[in-house]
Image (tube, grey):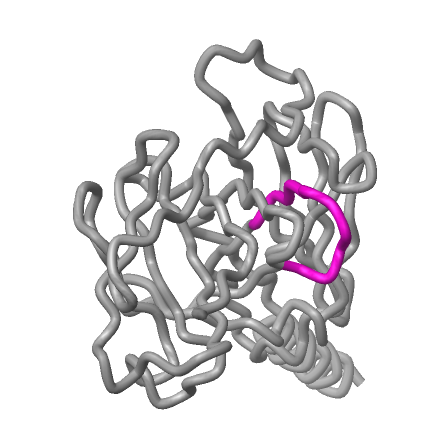
Amino acid sequence: MKDKIFRMITVLGLLFLLYSCGNEAPVISSIKYQILIYENGSLNIGKNSIFLSVYFVLDDPNGLDDIVDVKITNSESDYSWIIPKDTLLKSSPVWDEKKYVGFSFLDYNNADSILTGDYIIEATDSVGNIADGTFFVEIAGLSSNEPYKAPQIKYHIGKVKSNEFKIIGDKYSSLEMKLLNYPKAYNGGRKKFLSGKNIIIEKEMVQPRNQISIRINQNEDENIIYFLKNFILE
């Protein structure tokens, strides 16, 4: 009788260990955030808008399909966003040889401002395990925990030649250009120009009515980014 009880306890213990090992909690690391400012005409919104973009490395021993959702909360205001798994996995950029997940359009106050201060990310898996990570959003010259309103956009595109342009109006670190109607250009991506360098488009790529998307990285960290309204070649 004792042997049977011992065997049952042993089997139950093994089953518990197997179950536990197969349901380990996910892990969040390498959190990155950016402040994205869109000029009216760069998105189908109808006004200048500002969003918080958050990406991070999410590891789950059972695969990312085991993740149910992710919650991002501003600690001071307790304002939060729930990001479903399907939305989370739609964008998976690779930075520094690491695959990230996240969302680029966390809006507040109808995309007129963003919340600063402490944030917490919570990822929940299928059995209720929760991983968490924290980050801090700050703006130079702004007190912590104050909303940051979409700033006035001072950047403008000036024409130098039919295939050469420059950004005027304010300082920036670098810019990135994409030809929206020429998918072969730059392998479908953006070409980068450092501050002070004019935007030069190869003449074979200059086509009338082609739209150009301009991304401006305000600082070297590239965590404050402006998207100007699409520019149309004449």
- Of the 4 image quadrants, the one containing the C terminus is bottom left
| Depth order, front residue of 218/167 | 167
Circle count: 0
Q: Residue at x 76, y 87 (%)?
A: 4
- Judge whether 43 appears above or below 144 on screen: below
Counting from the top left corner in percent of width and height, residue 70 is at: 70, 57
Q: Relative to 204, does residue 54 appear above or below in the rendering?
A: above
Measuring 19% from the left and 49% from the top, which residue is drawn there? 194
Image: 41 above or below 139: below
Q: Is residue 51 magenta?
A: yes
Looking at this view, is 158 or 5 the one in front? 158
> Where is residue 21, by image quadrant?
bottom right
Residue at x-position 74% and y-position 34%: 112
Residue 39 placement (x, y as % from top left): 60, 46
Left or right, 1 with respect to 233, comes to right
Confirm whether the magenta stretch covers residue 50: yes
Q: Is residue 82 left or right of residue 182?
A: right
In magenta, the rendered stretch is 43-53
In which quadrant of the rendered view does residue 96 lie?
bottom left
Query: Which image quarter is the N terminus in?
Result: bottom right
Q: How far across and down, in percent of the image, does residue 132 sit?
A: 60, 46
Q: Residue at x 65, y 80 (%)?
A: 65
Quadrant of the image occupied by residue 219? top left
Along the viewing direction, whichever of 140 and 47 lies nearer the viewer: 47
Picture coordinates of residue 214, whole percent (x, y): 43, 57
Nearer-the-camera pick, 147 or 181? 181
| In this rendering, position of residue 136 left or right of residue 106 | left
